[in-house]
Image (cartoon, helix red, strand yellow):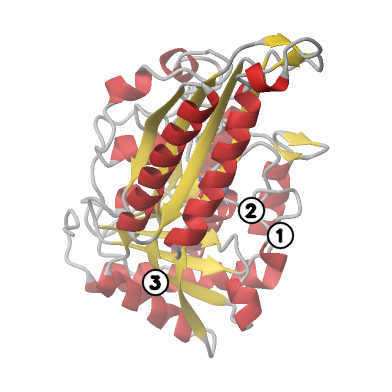
Amino acid sequence: MNVHARLADLATLGATPDGIDRGLFTPADGAARRRFAGWARAAGFAVEQDRAGNVFARLAGGTDGPPILCGSHLDTVKQGGAYDGAFGVVGGLEALERLAASAAELRRPIEVAAWAGEEGSRFPLGCLGSSAFAGLTSLDEIEALAGDDGEPFAHALRGPHGLLADVPLRDGFPAPSAYIELHIEQGPLLERAQVRLGVVTAIAGQRRLRVSIAGQQGHAGTIPMRWRADALCAASEVVLAVERAALEVGESVATVGWLEVSPKQTNIVPGRVELRVDARSVDDDRVAEIERRIRETAGRIARARGTPIEIELVELRAAAPMDDRLREIVRAACESLVPAVLDLPSGAGHDAMCLAQIVPTAMLFVPSIGGHSHIALEKTAPDDLELGINALAAALLTADRELPLGRGTR
Ligand code: HGY
Ligand code: MN
Ligand code: MN
């Protein structure tokens, strides 16, 4: 079964009329992780999992020490596409199969990981499995999380779609020598530059805020406009303030993609709104400035409208510069295959942000047609998928030959 067939198979898991919905430890995600383990075993690789739900397939090498690691995630956003994450997992698996078939002499093992819950689409923490692996979030913190549907992480992890029944559980989170993540670009830059491979310079840092706005619920027909404390009108000003902050700070993005109004009835003045902000930049100071401006403006809105506004910083990921030496190895692998390679930042977050905190890390991009991602339209040309896998395999081989054995040091 090749990468195209595997991606098509995975795309059936969590398929909806509006795209793929494959939240961590849902039946669809459990099936996807079982597929990955089954394919890896059929390829002759040893398969293990860890206590955060990450799954690893291992191609043995001359020594049994820390591997060169690749991989990505199998979970998706709601209404997601078929390539975000999944391509890095099955593309990594295919790269290992090609290395195994080439009988290349490996100094150390090479592993491909399926990281648990990168999207944060079910549990309120992005890069959940890779941040546990990197020691950025403790298992206790993760076990205390509850999914949007209320199920505690600890319960889902031990449920029928969490840890895989017949896969050995490894102790701890042993660090690799290095990490290379293959991923779709999820943006338009490669396509616009007519370049088929990209090498990531840095991954944008991000802050996620939870904003709660308390208004005065009331009858839509009887409360005079000047006497209202309308939570949704206040929220609307906050949303525009988020957009304005990113525009004014520059070289950054900020989005409100989630908002809930209550009691959400036509003839009731909204009493409460909760919304979430996603702010990003490769420059951490800019993200901090966006948060500062949002807080300042929200204070003014709250006073002017009589609608108390609470803002909680729920997630902070520092921008992650990629490792120079590993980037050069990835770039050289790409240049051996195509005439032009583009260096570019990643506005999208990835598990590589977490791995970059502990070991040398690099990312390799293939184009997204139309720049579409986090939408059912998401697609990458089959030839570009193949090219990405060949570049990854070449980079893994060079990294194995050139990097010192043992745990990677940043
Ligand atoms: O939000 C992101 O950038 C990633 O897709 N989790
Ligand atoms: Mn994503
Ligand atoms: Mn992704």
Crowd band around label 2 with a 10 angstrom C-alpha radius: few (<14), some (14–19), many (20+)? many
Residue 29 placed where, x, y %?
Answer: 59, 31
For discs 2 and 3, the disc positioned in front in the rendered view? 2
- Callout 3: CB less than 8 Å from ligand 3: no
Q: Are marks 1 and 2 in contact (CB under 8 Å)?
A: yes
Q: Which residue is mark 1?
A: 379
What amino acid type is highlighted by mark number 2? Tyr
Q: Are marks 3 and 1 in contact (CB under 8 Å)?
A: no
Numbered badge on residue 395: 3
Which residue is pictured at 35% across the width and 44% down the height? Answer: 292
What amino acid type is highlighted by mark number 3? Ala
Asked which secondary structure carries label 3, the reply is helix
Asked which secondary structure carries label 2, the reply is loop
Which residue is pictured at 54% across the width and 13% down the height? Answer: 150
Crowd band around label 3 with a 10 angstrom C-alpha radius: few (<14), some (14–19), many (20+)? many
Crowd band around label 1 with a 10 angstrom C-alpha radius: few (<14), some (14–19), many (20+)? many
Vertical placement of 287 versus 53: above or below?
below
Numbered badge on residue 348: none
**Quadrant housing residue 321:** bottom left
Which residue is pictured at 51% across the width and 50% down the height? Answer: 254
Residue 28 placed where, x, y %?
Answer: 65, 30
Vertical placement of 345 versus 61: above or below?
below
Q: Earlier in the sequence, mark 3 or mark 1?
A: 1
Give whichever of 374, 393 is nearer the camera: 374
What amino acid type is highlighted by mark number 1? Lys
For discs 3 and 1, the disc positioned in front in the rendered view? 1
Quarter of the picture holding the C terminus? bottom left
| Residue 40 placement, left or right of 216 | left
Q: Earlier in the sequence, mark 2 or mark 3?
A: 2
Q: CA distance from mark 2 to mark 3?
A: 21 Å
Number of numbered tags placed on the structure image:
3
